[in-house]
Image (cartoon, rainbow, N blue to C red):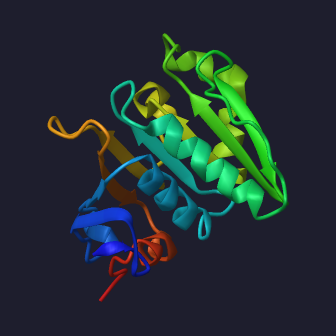
Amino acid sequence: MEGLAGVDDGVKTEAMITRPSEARPIVMTLEGPEATAALAERLGGVLRSGDTLLLQGDIGAGKTHFARALIQSLQARHGAVEDVPSPTFTIVQTYHAGPLEIWHADLYRLADPSELAELGLEGALSQALTLVEWPDRLGTMTPSRALWMSFRIPPDRPEARIVEITPRGAGWERVLGALGAEAGS
């Protein structure tokens, strides 16, 4: 596939998902930061309240860059411009894009899932668009319905990123459609 929606934006799809229930990943190669931002903008067009993106990968793999690009693209649709810093030290940052509430959490510094209770993240998972970096720290709060996105750097191309996108639970057809994947049959 050449980019998303036929636009050559540096995104190459290596594998497609045929049915969401199979939970096979969509694997994309993002040729640089611009391609990561293009993917974020494309997904921003179809995400809504109650959707959760679980972003995993090593430090520097592109999770925060993707989240920042997604949040800023959503805000730009409503005429807003806001700095989107990494929530590594604050743990949670909240934003608005028109009526859409967005929570961006970076759980890297959490030592135990019990620390999540005071963050209010559980309510956000059902009511806001929620982006969670380091989702392995969610423990029992890991939602059964989420879009898992794993970022990694190919060893021979430090500017590129490989992203595996795996839908879990029902209701991801619109997202799969935005990615150019078949959503059923």
Which residue is found at the position 63% from the left and 22% from the top?
91
Left or right, 8 with reference to 122? left
What is the quadrant of the C terminus in the image? bottom left
User: Which of these two is toward me, 43 or 125?
Assistant: 43
Q: State the image coordinates of residue 71 (x, y, percent, origin top left).
A: 66, 49
- Above/below status of 176 relative to 169: below
Q: Does residue 77 show up?
A: yes
Which residue is found at the position 39% from the left and 28% from the top?
60
Q: State the image coordinates of residue 182 (x, y, percent, origin top left).
A: 33, 81
User: Which of these two is toward me, 137 or 179?
Assistant: 179
What is the quadrant of the N terminus in the image? bottom left
Which residue is found at the position 28% from the left and 39% from the top?
152
- Above/below status of 103 relative to 34: above
Q: Does residue 129 show up?
A: no
Q: State the image coordinates of residue 107 (x, y, percent, origin top left).
A: 53, 24
The image quadrant that residue 121 belongs to is top right
- Above/below status of 168 relative to 102: below
Which residue is found at the position 57% from the left and 61% from the top?
41
Q: State the image coordinates of residue 157 (x, y, percent, origin top left).
A: 21, 40
Left or right, 170 with reference to 96? left
Left or right, 100 with reference to 91? right
